[in-house]
Image: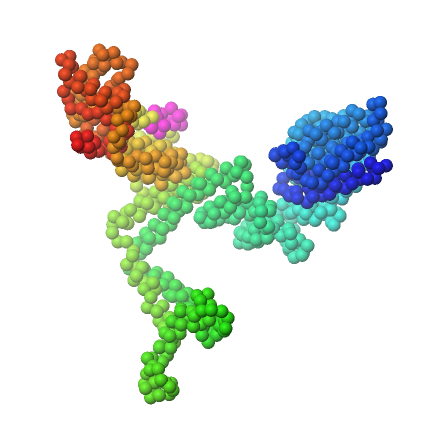
Amino acid sequence: MGAYYNIIYNGNLALAAGKAELAQNYKDNYWEILPIERMQVEEETNKPGETKNANFQRAEDKATKAIQKHNMRIAGEEYNPQMDEAFLLLGKARYFDQRFFPALEAFNYILTDYPESDRIVTAKVWREKTYMRMGNSELALQNLKKLFDEHIEFEDEDLADASAAMAQAYLNLDEKENAIAPLNNAIEFTDSNEEKGRYLFIKGQIYDRLGQRDSANKAFDQVIALNRKSPRSYMINAYMEKAKNFDYDEGDRLAFMELMNDMLENRENRPFLDIINYQVGEYYKNTDSIDGAVEFYNYSLRAQVPQQNNYLKSRDYLNLGNINFDAAAYKEAGAYYDSVMMNIPESTREFRSIRRKRENLDDVILYEDIANTNDSILSLVNMSEAEQLSYFEKVTSEMKEKAIAEAKREFQNKANNPGNLFGRQASNAGGGSRSSNSSFYFYNNTQVARGLQKFYRTWGEIELKDNWRYASEAANNAKVEEVDEEEVYLAEIENDPAFDPQNYISEIPSDVEVIDSLKKDRNFAYYQLGVIYKEKFKEYDLASDKLEALLQNNPQERLILPSKYNLYKIYEATGNTAMMEKWKQNILSEHPDSRYASILRNPRSLRDDNNSPEAVYTSVYRKYKDEKYKEVIDDTKKYIDLFTGEDIVPKFELLKAFARGRYEGFKAYEESLNYVALTYPQSEEGKKAEQIVKQSLPALKNTTFTENENEAVFYLVYPFEVGKEEMALELQQKLDAAIADKGYENQFYSSVDFYTPQQFFVIVHGLQSKLGAEGFGKILEKEEDYQIEHTNFSISDSNYQIIQVHKNLDAYLTKQSQ
């Protein structure tokens, strides 16, 4: 009796308090099927002696105390009938404290040591719930089925718990349809309205996922019918789920909006205004009322509590981003997509998809800005002088009217709120010392200066004397009329050059080269936009609009054929066979010898053609490895033009940067890398170029030669002018022979290195000191078998890198001769 009415009773109270706190702190995600039980399992385990909730620790302590002090196990038999209750309390406390292995131990102890207990069924149900929490839903489901097959008599609470656990096991195994029957049992036998409302809501969600909307709405109606018997969040979200299922073709739209408006006006629904406003926004979006959708998505965002319901916030931002994207407001769309990514986990597939779309938008924003700006300028260029004047007169007139209205509004506000006599700030008479923080008029230098200016403007220069306002001298000075400040300001607006049409007309370009450059940039932007919309966004209408407009703008020759081929592919993807055939025949008739024509005649050629972009790049890269840098630079320029708009272009650009670096030196290398990084920032090559610019170039900028003779790698270098290759080859053969004769094959070797377009080196590698390099050179010069008298010098590896990067051999030789 002491164990039951004192220790176990208080333990159960602590357990109930802990469960209530757990449920209160748990945030349901109504966008997913709710879990049967409101408990967030955390991956971090408790350290020894720690607990996630003090109430569960208290419940466990009470259970342990009851077992230790009140057990009556004599000769292997327990005489205290409350011990199974104590072990059950112990298991539940550990379960809710997320210590599942110890909880399982407690439940199993009841099953093995108290086989006659009336709590056996309860212990089995909780054991299976524990198995599920440990990730073994299959075993839990199998055991629960066996339990039901035994045809034992369940208490209502145990039957509800067992059925709910079985439903959760089916959900864990993604067998949604099988979860319905046990969930119905749980709904029927639970005596908790909170659980009944939750189970009914889950049932509706399951039917929704199975595509059975009528059954889902029926379940949600049952949740709504519970009204105040279950938490209001279930009822509100049941309304929202029904709203998602609204039939926009056959449903009563007027009744739907009346219901939504009633819910928005109900003061009890204030905590749920975010989701209600979101659903109204969805209604407007589905009825093509975009302005209404934007308005209510923003209402939803403003109604949300910080750090709560981040997923709903992400849906608002995503919808606003998509609306702006469809309206070609790409900067705004990009900002909204940034907000989406801040409110969803980085590990999700959706995050990666949004991130790709956001990165692609950078290019869209760039090229749309170029296209819109250049189109605007070119439209002005094409106007006659009279049309230009008429256009800017209208624009400046509107600007001036707006400025005047704003000025009048400001002065009206000043007149209505004159403040005190000495300015807007009130005096703190007797209130503190003279300081910069004082609000007293005469302590504010700005206010005093303004007052003096107004005085002089009104009264002129007045001598300091009595009755100055009435003296004849003052009367003469007072002829200076007070100037109306508002009139002065309005006059300034009238004379402001910003409102002079000629000021803008003079800025319109007239130079042919400038205009041609604008056209080229505009056309290239159109082409890039067409490709981006086609390849990255599958926005085929936008893509075809841009490419069609490009072909009507007299584009550069290199853009014409790729544009036509992309239009062919767009119409092929959209199933527009007439337009597809039109562009196919156009390419075959006007460009019969092109690579695109061969692809159209034989689609396999795209895969087999040795002239494919990938095959061409491979051949050019081989030239780079063979140090044919001038050929590489020329080839890359040619193929960049040929493959404009294809993904291979950034690879050619980066290869050209490397070749220019080796051929022309550091400045050319830096310039080319910056071009790749800024022009193709979303490509792998652009990112690699940016990384080199930030991490490698700073070190390569060094032009100071080291004098460290302890370096481990040195070279003996024989410089040659271009055109003396035969002489260089003869020398290299002598070097190889000398290395072999002296037994240095495993240590030394020779090579020919490019230096500049005018000079190259024959080099001996493998030398380990400056003296060793110079000594080897002298031996080869003196010995009769070789007599290599060609000019040479020794150089360390670090200094050799400097002269190769900066092409400053003369500076190095000068330093060595000093």
Q: Percent from the top left, x then y, of residue 175?
A: 67, 31
The image shows residue 778, relative to residue 379, as above or below, that is above
Relative side of 779 to 138, left or right: left
- Chosen colour scheme: rainbow
The residue at the point 34 percent across, 86 percent down is 475
Q: Percent from the top left, x then y, of residue 95?
A: 70, 34
The residue at the point 30 percent across, 41 percent down is 556
Residue 397 seen in the figure: yes
- Report the number of discs: 0
Residue placed most toward the observer, 326 or 86:
86
Quadrant showing the N terminus: top right
Of helix, strand and loop, which mostly describes the magenta segment? helix
Quadrant showing the C terminus: top left
Relative side of 311 to 569, left or right: right
> Which residues, given as a range, are shown in magenta?
603-617
Residue 144 seen in the figure: no
The image shows residue 180, relative to residue 334, as above or below, that is above
The image shows residue 259, relative to residue 92, as above or below, that is below
Quadrant in the picture for residue 672: top left
Quadrant in the picture for residue 188: top right
Q: Percent from the top left, x then y, of residue 506?
A: 28, 59
Relative side of 191 to 289, left or right: right
Q: Percent from the top left, x then y, of residue 203?
A: 70, 39
Quadrant in the picture for residue 629: top left
The residue at the point 38 percent across, 30 percent down is 600
Inspect the magenta stretch and tell me whether residue 609 lies in it.
yes
Residue placed most toward the observer, 789 or 497:
789
Relative side of 406 to 100, left or right: left
Inspect the magenta stretch and tell me whether residue 306 lies in it.
no
Residue placed most toward the observer, 293 or 47:
47
Residue placed most toward the observer, 295 or 376:
295
The residue at the point 73 percent across, 43 percent down is 17
